[in-house]
Image: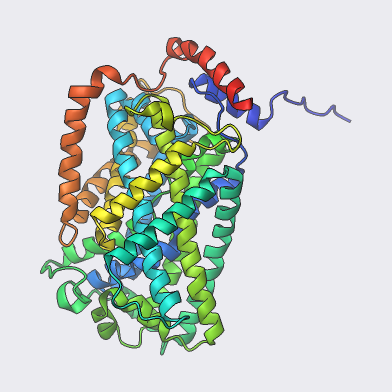
Amino acid sequence: MSPPPPVSDNTPIDTDIQHLHKMGYAQELSRRMPLFSNFAISFSIICILAGGITSFQLGFSSAGGFGIGVGWLIGSVFALIVACSMAQIASAYPTAGGLYHWSSILGGRGWGWATAWINLLGLIFVVASVNVGVYLLFTQLVLTNIFHMDVSKWGLWQQAIGVVIITGSQGLFNHFGIRLTTKLTDFSGYLILVTALVLTVAMLYAAPKLDFSRLFTFVNNTGDAGGGVFPHYGSSLMAIALGLILPLYTITGFDASAHTSEETVNAQRTVPKGMIHAVVWSAVFGYIMICAFVLAMPDVTKAAKDGGNVFFNLLGGLGIPTWLKFLIYIAIVLANYLCALAGVTSTSRMLFAFARDGGLPWSSGLKKVHHVYRTPTYAIWTVVVLAILATLYSPAFSALAAGCAVFLYISYAMPVAAGFFAEGKTWTEFGPFRLGALSKPFAIITVLGSIILLFIGTRPPNDILDNYAIGCVVLLILGWFLLERRRFKGPPIGEAAVRQRQAEIAAAEIAIER
């Protein structure tokens, strides 16, 4: 018999910690997430029961069945290309707040600083938009249908109170540790798959006939034909482009796998897998589900005129037992709630990582980790407050959804663009996951697609985002050149900078253990 292979002295967690030290950071967060949990947190934020339902009308009220049957596929392929481009960088640099760190290493500290703010804004929009969706779903599906309450006169104040309660409770769950949050997001992964399957079967069961030609028939539903969700556009191409907000709002937030890198075991391999699998399975199951919505419509022309109520009218008309319908209602609301819960987790890690490198004027508090729960509690509650404020400034769901897609994909494109120029030059250290010959073509598609999305996402009725976009650019330029260019040092880059951090790393890990 041949002798057994030698046993390494290092466990995967030891290797993870050594790699983190090599990048100049201490292991302060609790590293316990396996592959499924890393996948589940991105899968939960993507949540086809959130974007696929609450923004369904954005696809159908623009290009009709074509916006669903073809538009979803176009958006999904683009999202997968972006995820693969990000996964390659995440495999090399698995840190919390990944995008900011990647941009700083590959494109310079100014580029990284700008990426951090744009990514943070997009993540805030994720939590804000989904929680507005949770409120709307809860009032329409649960309060109205199950408890027969009249909420027709409820307005902004009721929504604001509801969002405060919802977001505050998500902050509490995150406060008390990644173990609790991981269990909830793991459960969310199963809940999304089961509910999507049941909902799909129910829709197909209720369908008057399975007319698959609906999924490939283009109808310009902008204007009154689509219930006024969009103003009328005479251009068919513009109508199709507007419909892409549906898949790109839904399949976003997968950077959560990267933001939780420092809490993930075997991160260099696990994070890329978690990110890509989350996009693939969301795209597949989401496509089947929303296609079932179109096939179940008794009359596609009348359904289009329902606008924002198209899904609710469909769901209410399902010929299935009442008890099952009520369970579907509750499952949809719960899945959306857990989607935003995972969003708070991702956003708080981004904020924590940026503060750890002095990216914020008030960084000293935001970079603190609770010695018992091992969570960045100050960052968590800051995210809660910012998400609530975002819903007060822009209470309209469509604007929040478009803002989420636009700002996140722009922040995704920024480190990818930096990597395009740095690969093989200043970027010579790679992780186990490589794109090889596809790296530069994927980077070009990512950047060009994100620019197109910026144009689409700021068209009426979401032209309020012009204010966000213009204000963001102006503040970033002024903030960098007037304030941060001299103050902000960025992450530790190079052996000398990392060596200077070693004493701080040791002190931070001793302090958190005590």
Q: Is residue 271 above or below residue 360?
A: below
Image position, residue 26 (x, y; %): 54, 24
- Figure colour scheme: rainbow
Total labels: the figure holds 0
- The quarter of the image holding the C terminus is top right
Judged left or right of residue 183, residue 157 is left
Quarter of the figure that contains the N terminus: top right
- Residue at left offset 38%, top offset 59%: 163
Observer able to see residue 151? yes
279 or 306, which lies in front? 306
**Quadrant assignment, res 98:** top left
Q: Is residue 46 visible?
A: no
In the picture, residue 323 is in which quadrant? bottom right
Tell which residue pokes out farthest to the right in this image.
1
In the displayed structure, would residue 386 be above or below residue 115? Answer: below
Question: 406 or 241: which is nearer to us?
Answer: 406
Q: Nearer the viewer, residue 156 or 476?
A: 156
Q: Report x, y in % for residue 479.
A: 21, 29
**Horizontal placement of 380 versus 361: left or right?**
right
Residue 210 screen position, x and y as percent: 41, 84
Residue 436 lies, in percent from the top left, at 43, 35
Closer to the camera, 286 or 473?
473
From this view, report whether residue 449 is shown above or below residue 149. above
Residue occupying image coordinates x 41% and y 87%? 317
Q: Residue at x 42, y 32 (%)?
A: 366
